[in-house]
Amino acid sequence: MAKNQNQGQIAEHSARRYLEQRGLTFVEQNVRYRFGEIDIVMKDGSDWVFVEVKYRSPSQYGGAVNALSQAQTLRIRKAASHYIQINRIDAICRFDVVAVDPDAMQWIRDAF
């Protein structure tokens, strides 16, 4: 478990740097509520971006791109909705995924 957590933290850090290099602004990371978690919150201009980072080895269960289930997207949406409400955000929001494999990184805008 500790190895997977460490790989997940490394993947999140790499994803954050990757998005910052592409012009997004970091807001917050690892936002946790009892009903869901947001890996990274960023801004793209005036738009708010809720980022889910998925790490998988390329051959493990179809790689990182295929690692997000419908139940996970529902939990992320609930967490983001709560975040928007408590922070009184009145702006366009979107959900992105950064899929991190050992040899590549893929940024999927408006993933769900």
Image: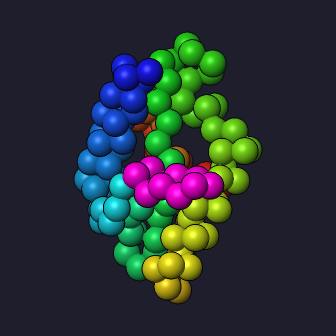
- Image height of 55 relative to 16, above or below: above
Q: Is residue 18 left or right of residue 94?
A: left
Q: Position of residue 27 (x, y in %)?
A: 33, 66
Relative to 4, is 17 on the left or the right? Answer: left
Q: Nearer the viewer, residue 34 or 38?
A: 34
Q: Nearer the viewer, residue 52 or 65?
A: 52
Q: Is residue 95 magenta?
A: no
Q: Residue at 43%, 57% (x, y): give it.
A: 31
Residue 22, given in percent of the width and then of the height, sits at: 31, 56
Image location (x, y in percent) of residue 58: 51, 18
Q: Is residue 33 magenta?
A: yes
Q: Quadrant of the N terminus?
A: top left
Residue at (54%, 30%) from the top-left corner? Answer: 64
Q: Is residue 73 visible?
A: yes
Outermost residue toward the top? Answer: 59
Which residue appears at 34% of the width and 61% of the height? 28
Is residue 109 at all visible to an observer of this figure?
A: no
Is residue 112 shown left or right of residue 27? Answer: right
Determine the residue positioned at 57% across, 15% down.
60
x and y percentages locating residue 99 in the rendered image: 48, 37
Main SS class of the magenta portion in the image: strand
Seen in the image, is 7 located left or right of residue 73? Answer: left
Looking at the rendering, the stretch of residues picked out in magenta corresponds to 30-39
Instruction: Specify the quadrant of the image occupied by residue 41.
Output: bottom left
User: Which residue in the rendered view is the most extreme toward the right?
Assistant: 70
